[in-house]
Image: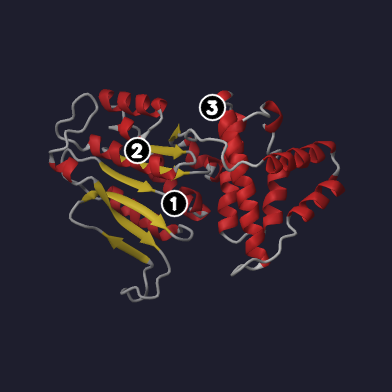
């Protein structure tokens, strides 16, 4: 059941109605910050579609489709121990509960064109009658442009009884052509408290935003320079300490944005949340913190702090 995994009510209503009407889309984008809830929703969605005896949009739990709810996993990595010669960089794993018509594509780095070619081959392969073939890309924001372009044809004209779900924490990192060919379902941030948000972080963000809006660039970059004056810690280089501090600062802004989003949802705020998640991904990829934060400010982020100063 979707409710047991804290799936947003709007998403539950949409998916349940489509299952009931037999009007399931060929491609979806599950967009939002909580990757686990999006992934669990995808698993439950595929399980219900392949259930032989569903009742009121709930899987029976006893048929073959319900007893094999997990996908086989295609993990893309540059593993030196790959048994293929030359190395294929694609490792396919499955167990006794894996559904042979359900594929998960994931990676610890970027997702290039090779796993997408395998996904296309997998989706166009014949399956058993009455089976819904499905594929989930769990970190869609790390798809390369070439990989995204390779998916356009199958997203536009998916085979019958086939489903592709792209999971992302940064909707706007996907190409517009990918977004236009998929049904977008948004997963808003879950309820959070203000614990972890420091007033000094919010004061700094307000100061940076005000300097940006006034065009006081010299003062703005002076504040950024002071912010990034971080000493190396135990087992940390100055660069990693700056990345960690910048990441914590952006996470504080994300918590505040989540609070405002629940009170005053808007497309602009949704974009800002998406982009801040993208900034966190950049920091994990060893990008320069000062550049990441400067670009975020140049995009007008944050713009939501003056709307709600009380958390």
Q: Looking at the image, tell me whether mark 3 or mark 2 is earlier in sequence order.
A: 2
Nearer mark to the viewer, of 1 and 3: 3
* Residue at 50% over, 43% down: 169
Q: Which residue is mark 1?
A: 150
The answer to which quarter of the image holds residue 311 is: top right
Residue under the point 83% across and 52% down: 222
Residue assigned mark 2: 41
Percent x, y of residue 292: 67, 52
N-term-proximal mark, 1 vs 2: 2
Secondary structure beneath label 2:
helix
Mark 1–mark 3 contact, CB under 8 Å?
no
Earlier sequence position, callout 1 versus callout 3: 1
Looking at the rendered structure, the secondary structure element under dot 1 is: helix
Res. 262 mark: 3
Q: Are marks 3 and 2 in contact (CB under 8 Å)?
A: no
Q: Nearer the viewer, mark 3 or mark 2?
A: 3
Q: Cα distance, mark 3 to mark 2?
A: 21 Å
Where 224 sits versus 28, above or below?
A: below
Q: Is residue 159 visible?
A: no
Placement of 112 over or under 213, stated as above or below: below
Residue 54: % across, % down: 18, 30
Marks 1,2: beta carbons within 8 A: no
């Amino acid at each position: 059941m979707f409710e047991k995994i804290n799936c947003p009510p709007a998403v539950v209503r949409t998916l349940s109605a489509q299952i009931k009407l037999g009007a399931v889309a060929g491609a979806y984008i599950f967009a939002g910050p909580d990757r686990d809830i999006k992934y669990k929703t995808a698993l439950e969605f595929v399980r219900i579609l392949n259930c032989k005896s569903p009742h009121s949009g709930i899987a029976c739990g006893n048929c073959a489709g319900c007893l094999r709810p997990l996908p086989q996993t295609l993990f893309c990595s540059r593993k030196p121990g790959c048994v293929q010669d030359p190395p294929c960089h694609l490792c396919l794993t499955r167990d006794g509960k894996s559904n042979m018509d359900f594929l998960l594509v994931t990676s610890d780095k970027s997702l290039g064109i090779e796993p997408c070619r395998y996904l296309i081959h997998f989706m166009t392969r014949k399956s058993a009658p009455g089976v819904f073939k499905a594929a989930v890309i769990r970190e869609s924001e790390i798809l390369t442009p070439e990989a995204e372009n390779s998916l356009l044809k199958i997203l536009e004209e998916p085979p019958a009884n086939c489903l592709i779900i792209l999971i992302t924490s940064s909707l706007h990192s996907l190409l517009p052509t990918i977004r236009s060919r998929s049904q977008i379902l948004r997963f808003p941030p879950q309820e959070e408290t203000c614990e972890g948000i420091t007033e000094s972080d919010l004061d700094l963000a307000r100061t940076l935003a005000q300097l940006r809006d006034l065009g006081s660039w010299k003062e703005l970059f002076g504040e950024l320079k002071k912010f990034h004056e971080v000493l190396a810690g135990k087992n940390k280089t100055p660069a990693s300490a700056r990345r960690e501090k910048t990441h914590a600062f952006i996470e504080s802004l994300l918590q505040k944005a989540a609070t405002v989003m629940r009170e005053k949802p808007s497309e602009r705020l949704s974009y800002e949340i998406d982009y801040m998640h993208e900034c966190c991904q950049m920091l994990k990829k060893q990008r320069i913190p000062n550049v990441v934060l400067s670009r975020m400010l140049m995009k007008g982020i944050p713009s939501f702090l003056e709307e709600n100063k009380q958390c």
